[in-house]
Image: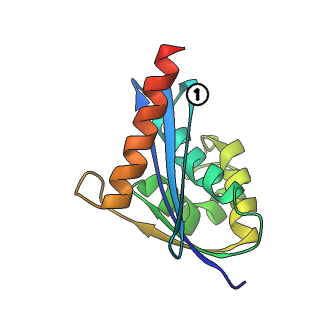
Amino acid sequence: MSERVQLFSDGACKYNPGIGGWGVVLRRGDFEKELYGSEKYTTNNRMELKAVIEGLSTLKNSCEVDVYTDSRYVQQGMTSWLELWKKRNWRTAGREPVANQDLWIQLEKLAAFHKVEWHWVKAHTGHPENERADALANLAIQLAQKK
């Protein structure tokens, strides 16, 4: 693993559930790439997960990746909850099925291919890359509304 990549992600949803969008800013050295996409009927949490999944999916070689997200759901899910959910056969502490299990499984597989460090950033506080990822997620929603 020689490349270190920064991945800034955000998800958004107009209504919840409703039209959702995700945005990603990838940076390796001086190189930056922006990605975004949408779904017609989804939730904010799914879009937060989808942003990281899409960002990691674009990395073809195994890398060291710093993932920056404003979603405690994503950050804590990957660093604290995932192993517990799996031990409980994908059940929460309240014995309910884990929401978004399909995306958690995808994200876990992608994260295992890389060496990922998870960072939480506070939303809407002027963090430039988080603001850009948020703008991309909202752009995706606007474009989806026009279709």
Horizontal relation, residue 12 to residue 2: left or right: left
Residue 10 is left or right of residue 37, and the answer is left
**Residue drawn at x 60%, y 40% as measured from the top left:** 99
User: Callout 1: 10 Å neighbours few (<14), some, many (20+)?
Assistant: some
Whether residue 39 is situated above or below residue 12 in the rendered picture: above
Relative image position of residue 97 (x, y in whole percent): 64, 41
Element under label 1? strand
Q: Residue at x 22, y 57 (%)?
A: 125
| Amino acid type for the residue under numbered disc 1 | Glu
Quadrant of res 16: top left
Q: Quadrant of the N terminus?
A: bottom right
Quadrant location of residue 85?
bottom right
Residue extending farthest to the top is 147
Please provide percent x and percent y for residue 43. 50, 32
34 or 50, nearer to the observer: 34
- The number of callouts visible is 1
- Residue located at (50% from left, 73% from top): 30
Judged from this view, the residue extending furthest toward the front is 30
Q: Is residue 138 visible?
A: yes
Residue farthest to the left, as pictured? 125
What residue sits right under mark 1 in the picture?
A: 39
Location of the C terminus by quadrant is top right
Residue 17: in sight, yes or no?
no
Q: How is the image coloured?
A: rainbow
Q: Position of residue 24 (x, y in %)?
A: 51, 52
Tell me if 62 is positioned left or right of 83 in this view: right
Residue 47 at what x, y percent from top left?
53, 40
Return the residue found at the far bottom. 2
62 over 23 or under it: above or below: below
The foreground one among 43 and 28 is: 28
